[in-house]
Image (cartoon, grey):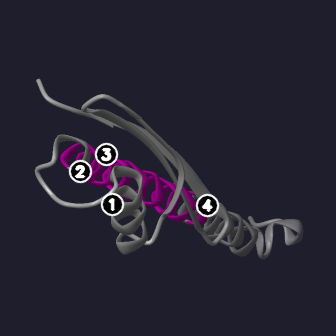
Amino acid sequence: MRLAEDAGAGSVLALALVGALVTCSSAVLVLGAALTVRQRAIGAADAAALAAADGASGAIAGEPCELAARVAAANRTALTGCQVDGLVATVQVSVRAGPAGATARSTAGPP
Protein backbone atom coordinates (compact mmCIF):
# COMPACT_ATOMS: atom_id res chain seq x y z
CA MET A 1 0.00 0.00 0.00
CA ARG A 2 1.46 3.43 -1.05
CA LEU A 3 0.97 6.62 0.84
CA ALA A 4 -0.16 9.68 -1.09
CA GLU A 5 2.57 11.81 0.51
CA ASP A 6 5.32 9.76 -1.21
CA ALA A 7 4.28 10.77 -4.70
CA GLY A 8 7.05 12.78 -6.42
CA ALA A 9 9.74 12.07 -3.81
CA GLY A 10 11.97 10.46 -6.46
CA SER A 11 11.80 13.61 -8.59
CA VAL A 12 12.94 15.78 -5.69
CA LEU A 13 15.83 13.41 -4.98
CA ALA A 14 16.85 13.39 -8.66
CA LEU A 15 16.74 17.19 -8.77
CA ALA A 16 18.91 17.42 -5.65
CA LEU A 17 21.47 15.02 -7.14
CA VAL A 18 21.61 16.97 -10.42
CA GLY A 19 22.10 20.20 -8.47
CA ALA A 20 24.95 18.68 -6.46
CA LEU A 21 26.58 17.38 -9.65
CA VAL A 22 26.39 20.80 -11.34
CA THR A 23 27.87 22.49 -8.25
CA CYS A 24 30.78 20.04 -8.03
CA SER A 25 31.45 20.28 -11.77
CA SER A 26 31.55 24.07 -11.60
CA ALA A 27 34.01 23.96 -8.71
CA VAL A 28 36.29 21.58 -10.64
CA LEU A 29 36.23 23.84 -13.71
CA VAL A 30 37.12 26.93 -11.67
CA LEU A 31 39.95 25.10 -9.91
CA GLY A 32 41.26 23.80 -13.24
CA ALA A 33 41.25 27.30 -14.72
CA ALA A 34 43.13 28.69 -11.70
CA LEU A 35 45.76 25.96 -11.93
CA THR A 36 46.21 26.61 -15.64
CA VAL A 37 46.77 30.32 -14.99
CA ARG A 38 49.26 29.48 -12.24
CA GLN A 39 51.24 27.16 -14.52
CA ARG A 40 51.26 29.81 -17.25
CA ALA A 41 52.74 32.32 -14.79
CA ILE A 42 55.40 29.84 -13.64
CA GLY A 43 56.43 29.03 -17.22
CA ALA A 44 56.58 32.69 -18.17
CA ALA A 45 58.67 33.54 -15.10
CA ASP A 46 61.14 30.75 -15.90
CA ALA A 47 61.50 31.86 -19.52
CA ALA A 48 61.86 35.53 -18.57
CA ALA A 49 64.51 34.72 -15.95
CA LEU A 50 66.48 32.67 -18.49
CA ALA A 51 66.31 35.52 -21.01
CA ALA A 52 67.49 38.03 -18.41
CA ALA A 53 70.34 35.75 -17.33
CA ASP A 54 71.38 35.27 -20.95
CA GLY A 55 71.38 39.03 -21.40
CA ALA A 56 73.43 39.52 -18.23
CA SER A 57 76.03 36.96 -19.34
CA GLY A 58 76.27 38.45 -22.83
CA ALA A 59 74.98 35.29 -24.51
CA ILE A 60 72.38 37.47 -26.24
CA ALA A 61 72.47 41.20 -26.89
CA GLY A 62 70.26 43.50 -24.91
CA GLU A 63 69.52 44.83 -21.46
CA PRO A 64 68.52 41.90 -19.18
CA CYS A 65 65.32 43.34 -17.71
CA GLU A 66 64.19 44.57 -21.14
CA LEU A 67 64.69 41.05 -22.52
CA ALA A 68 62.74 39.62 -19.59
CA ALA A 69 59.89 42.07 -20.22
CA ARG A 70 59.72 41.09 -23.90
CA VAL A 71 59.63 37.38 -23.05
CA ALA A 72 56.98 37.96 -20.38
CA ALA A 73 54.85 39.93 -22.83
CA ALA A 74 55.21 37.17 -25.42
CA ASN A 75 53.78 34.79 -22.80
CA ARG A 76 50.87 37.18 -22.13
CA THR A 77 52.10 38.08 -18.66
CA ALA A 78 53.39 41.30 -17.11
CA LEU A 79 56.89 41.67 -15.69
CA THR A 80 56.39 43.09 -12.19
CA GLY A 81 59.94 42.78 -10.90
CA CYS A 82 63.44 42.30 -12.25
CA GLN A 83 66.72 42.25 -10.38
CA VAL A 84 70.13 41.40 -11.82
CA ASP A 85 73.03 40.64 -9.51
CA GLY A 86 76.08 39.86 -11.57
CA LEU A 87 75.08 36.98 -13.83
CA VAL A 88 72.07 35.95 -11.72
CA ALA A 89 68.66 37.33 -12.69
CA THR A 90 65.50 37.17 -10.58
CA VAL A 91 62.18 38.12 -12.16
CA GLN A 92 58.59 38.24 -11.06
CA VAL A 93 55.63 38.08 -13.42
CA SER A 94 51.90 38.31 -12.92
CA VAL A 95 48.99 37.23 -15.05
CA ARG A 96 45.25 37.83 -14.82
CA ALA A 97 42.78 35.67 -16.71
CA GLY A 98 39.15 36.21 -15.85
CA PRO A 99 38.57 35.77 -12.14
CA ALA A 100 41.89 33.95 -11.66
CA GLY A 101 45.24 35.62 -11.26
CA ALA A 102 48.70 34.40 -10.37
CA THR A 103 52.18 35.69 -9.62
CA ALA A 104 55.41 33.72 -10.02
CA ARG A 105 59.05 34.42 -9.27
CA SER A 106 62.03 32.71 -10.88
CA THR A 107 65.81 32.96 -10.66
CA ALA A 108 68.30 31.94 -13.34
CA GLY A 109 72.03 32.16 -13.71
CA PRO A 110 75.13 30.08 -14.28
CA PRO A 111 75.46 26.82 -12.36
- Picture layout, residue 102 above or below residue 106: below
Q: Earlier in the sequence, mark 2 or mark 1?
A: 2
Relative placement, left or right, of 103 versus 42 is right
Q: Residue at x 46, y 52 (%)?
A: 38
Q: Which element carries disc 3, helix, strand or loop?
A: helix
Tell me if label 2 and label 3 are in contact, CB under 8 Å. no
**In this picture, which residue range is highlighted in magenta?**
26-54
Q: Earlier in the sequence, mark 1 or mark 4?
A: 1
Residue type, mark 4 in image: Ala
- Picture layout, residue 58 above or below residue 62: above
Q: Residues within 10 Å of mark 4 (few under 14, many from 20)?
A: some
Rounded to the nearest angstrom, the CA distance separating label 4 from label 3 is 23 Å
Relative placement, left or right, of 106 versus 10 is left
Residue at numbered disc 3: 49
Q: Quadrant of residue 91?
A: top left
* Residue 67 circle label: 1
Residue at numbered disc 2: 55
